[in-house]
Image: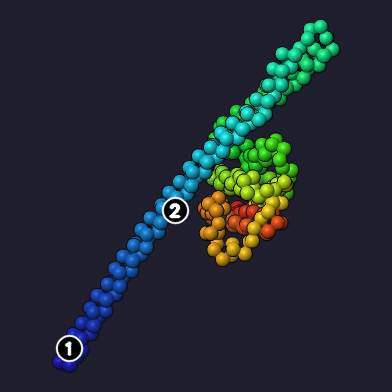
Amino acid sequence: MLEAKEEIRIAIIIATFLFVILTLLITISIILYKTRQNKFREEKQLLNAQFQQTLLETQLEIQEQTFKNISQEIHDNIGQVLSLVKLNINTMDCDKPKALNEKISDSKHLISKAIQDLRDLSKSLNTDYIAEMGLTRSVEYELEMIQKTGSYEIQFNTTGKPYRLEPQQELIFFRIVQEALHNIIRHAKATIIKVELLFEPEIFTLKIMDNGVGFDSSQLAINNYNGLGLGIRNMHNRASMINTDFNLMRHVEKGTTVILTLPLQTPKL
């Protein structure tokens, strides 16, 4: 009888001990889960803050580049066109009707061109013009501005049925294009610039190519872009922010190719 009571007491003690251990394990698990959840939430908030900061920096950089383009356009094109109109007016001779009519006609044409150029520039003053025009037209317009300099042969192609990406994605894609074109103009010594947009149902691809001097691409695999210029690192980092693969292929004397690949979460049918 006593032995039975002793066995029951020991069983109760063991059960109590196991219950306490189990309770402690559950409590610790809950605490660890809450800690991990809070850490995940903080990391998510930090990433979101970094993403918003990147978007803001991108918008400001685009605005700055836009103002530079406007200044250059006014100086190189609109200013020159209006100077020709002024020259025509100053050299008009009422005693020579045929020449006078030609100069009036030329002046009308030049003024129409200046008005159209000003309309195009007024669109660029709106920092939301990328969202309004879309990535395809925005890239095309940027290339048109470069082509007007007469220094480059521009080739622009789209494949597939064009569709719109998320506004943040288009904004960052456009800034990467601007950065790549800026690098080409400054460093590549190129004469041809090619841009291709490939619209597939499940993936979007953007390529920027030139026939410039290039460089030894073997260093890319070694340092993962860390040893390269700030512009290239910015392109790589921004592509990562929108889950886009960034590939840079450069070969000495064979030009450079930038390839951006974005898998689409929702296929475009």
Q: Residue furthest top?
A: 95
Tell me which amino acid carries mark 2. Answer: Leu
Quarter of the image where the N terminus is located: bottom left
Residue beneath the point at 58% across and 55% down: 244
Task: Decide if residue 109 is on the left or right side of residue 259.
Answer: right
Dividing the picture into quadrants, the one containing residue 125 is top right
Q: Quadrant of residue 89?
A: top right
In the figure, 10 relative to 20: above or below?
below
Q: Position of residue 178 (x, y in %)?
A: 60, 44
The numbered dot on residue 55 is: none
* Numbered circle sitting on residue 47: 2
Circle 2 SS class: helix
- Residue at the location (66% across, 36% down)? 145
Q: Is residue 269 positioned above or below 218 on the image?
A: above
Whether residue 136 is situated above or below residue 250 in the rendered picture: above
Q: On the image, numbered disc 1 is attached to which residue?
A: 5
- In the image, 71: left or right of 36? right
Q: Nearer the viewer, mark 2 or mark 1?
A: 2
Residue type indicated by callout 1: Lys
Residue 47 visible in image? yes
